[in-house]
Image (tube, helix red, strand yellow):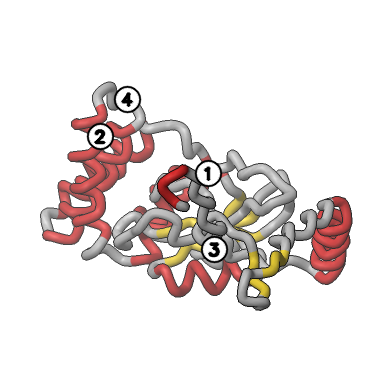
Amino acid sequence: MTDEDAFLRAIQATPQDDAPRLVYADWLDERGDDQSTRKADYLRITSRLRTARYDVVRMLWETRLRRLASVLESKWLAAVSRLATEACSHSFELSCPRRWENLRATRNPSVRTCDACSKRVNFCNSIGEARGHARRGECVALNIGVARSPGDLDNLRRFTRDEVVMIGRLRTEEVREVPAPPPAPIAPILPEPNGRAYRLSRRRIRREPRRKRWTPEDE
């Protein structure tokens, strides 16, 4: 086991403690190469985000993290990233409050296990990969360097057969309870002076001309 592996294990053993991250960052700075410098910056920024007081500062640091994550190894990011778990909620459950850094590590650095629900959580490097796991009912933690859009992982879970049957029953009961609308009134049919029939409506009302009063001049 190398020194770097020992640092990574220390970070995973105490995910809420920033001391192993900062010591690891100092060790990376001593190596001097560009990749080690990027890793050190990533570790320090993830530590500063926990104590950020202003949203503007948080947004700037998160933007910096995304740029660094785009050039760092996925395996290394899975070991040190602090991420929220996603795609673990549906219509009948609440969102899981567990985070990626607090989950139990496995032999695969990209897969961890949640002790609350005993489900596996997958570290994903693209939206397509995350959607594939979400459709199978698996939770995901998405690399912070991936471009996101609102609702890109919503409503992707496939319901089980029993849940589909239950949803169908509830839908059928709702349809039965809705009363049928009353029939539309039919306009009365009235005869015209020429013998034809017409329907009485607001737009068309035919009336007979009024008779002129009789006067002596009419004789």
Q: Nearer the viewer, mark 1 or mark 2?
A: 2
Q: Is residue 46 above or below residue 132?
A: above
- Label 3 crowd (10 A; few <14 / some 14-19 / many >=20): many
Q: Position of residue 112 (x, y in %)?
A: 58, 57
- Please give the name of the residue rendered at 20% of the width and 46% of the height, measured from the top-left corner: 41
Q: Residue furthest front?
A: 219
Q: Is residue 191 above or below residue 14?
A: below
Return the mark for residue 58. Answer: 2
Kind of residue indicated by mark 4: Thr
Return the mark for residue 99. Answer: 1
Q: Nearer the viewer, residue 60 or 197?
A: 197
Label 3 or label 2, whichever comes before in sequence order:
2
Kind of residue indicated by mark 2: Arg
Q: Nearer the viewer, residue 18 or 64?
A: 64
Label 1 or label 3, whichever comes before in sequence order:
1
Label 4 or label 3, whichever comes before in sequence order:
4
Q: Real-space Cα distance between discs 1 and 3?
A: 12 Å
Kind of residue indicated by mark 1: Arg
Q: Is residue 84 left or right of residue 166?
A: left
Kind of residue indicated by mark 3: Asn
